[in-house]
Image (spheres, grey):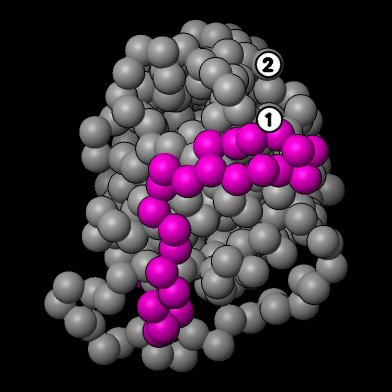
Amino acid sequence: MKVLCGIGGSDDSFRALDRTVERAAVANDDLTVAVVDNEDSSVAPDDVMERAREAVADAGIDAEVRRVEGDPGSRLIEIAEREAFEEIVLGGGHTSPMGKITIGSIAEFVLLNAKTTVTLVR
Amino acid sequence: MSDRRYPDAVADAFPVPPTEFTDREDRTVEIRPYDGGEAGYESLVGMYDDFDPSDRAQGIPPGGEKRIREWLDAILAGDCHNVIAWCGDEVAGHATLVPDGDAYELAIFVHQEYQRAGIGTHLIRGLLGHGQAAGVEKVWLTVERWNRAAVSLYKKIGFETSDAESFELEMGLRLNADADDEDDEAGDSGAGDDDTGGE
């Protein structure tokens, strides 16, 4: 399957990255990791790129790690449509001190606007 | 997450528990701070184990006794503030303030058997009185925007909407003046104040 995994440096995005890479190694997915701008993230895009390349190398798969600038939600959808991705994978949300799950604004936008299946990783 | 907005004005004084009242079903209900004891803890586990999953909000309370205990261990810790509504030796409801930087996150749950009897209002007021007495300055919460009954309860209490941009509404309340009296909290006109429905 042709999979686009969008990550911006939040904890849940790294969890999504690790699981997607793991799955791609088993299922032989055609994976692209898109490193997007996330203003809520404390990790710089270059470091997110590095972290993604490491995950891909560790899994021994051949996946592209791509820097995607601009509005993250709309850019992910544009790429998915233009390049015929079948699935978009994102982090499954931030957990508050109380334990409440809040879905990030990127996931919210993608969920409501994507034509593809969207997977949120918990 | 740290730039939440709160009302400029400090809320009125809330009643400090323990308090007692008769609910709309003629049951005597007592609001007491959680005393840290084993009996209260087990009664809370019992309420949440029996809690209707359809009343979960954003993943809490979790399902299954093991996860309930893990969750309670986190929110009953010493730096949290917890208040319980008791009907005899049964827990009717529970409300909690969990520290988050310089503020506290609020959540409240009333067991299905005790809903729509006015307990939620007493319980949240008791929690805020307990927090106010302990010097808590700012409280925030999130609520699913379709949960009209909860949104109107929070508004009645004095919470103001601070973020209406996402699936959940975020609301804030100021319980005590800031210790260092910051003066940069202006402009909280509050978008999305259209939820006048519910009870």
Which residue was labeled with disc 1? B111
Front-most of residues A83 and A41: A41
What's under tag 1, amino acid-wise? His
Q: Are marks 2 and 1 in contact (CB under 8 Å)?
A: yes
Q: Residue at x 24, y 60 (%)?
A: B135
Question: Does residue B85 sit above or below B135 in this rendering?
Answer: above
Q: Earlier in the sequence, mark 2 or mark 1?
A: 2
Chief secondary structure of the magenta portion: loop
What's under tag 2, amino acid-wise? Asp
Tag count in the figure?
Answer: 2
Residue A6 place in picture, x, y as percent: 55, 45
Which residue was labeled with disc 2? B50
User: For residue A75: magenta?
Assistant: no
Can residue A108 be seen in the rendering of this structure? no
Left/right placement of residue A13 relative to residue B55 reads left
Residue B121 place in picture, x, y as percent: 62, 53
Q: Residue at x 44, y 63 (%)?
A: B14
Disc 2 to disc 1, how far (Cα)? Answer: 8 Å
Front-most of residues B121 and B147: B121
Q: Residue at x 41, y 13 (%)?
A: B39
In which quadrant of the rendered view does residue A52 lie?
A: top left
User: For residue B13: magenta?
Assistant: yes
Can residue B151 be seen in the rendering of this structure? yes
Left/right placement of residue A91 relative to residue B14 reads right
In which quadrant of the rendered view does residue B134 lie?
A: bottom left
Question: Does residue A44 sit above or below B34 in this rendering?
Answer: below
Chain of the residue where label 2 is placed in the rendered structure: B
Q: Which residues are magenta?
A: B1-30
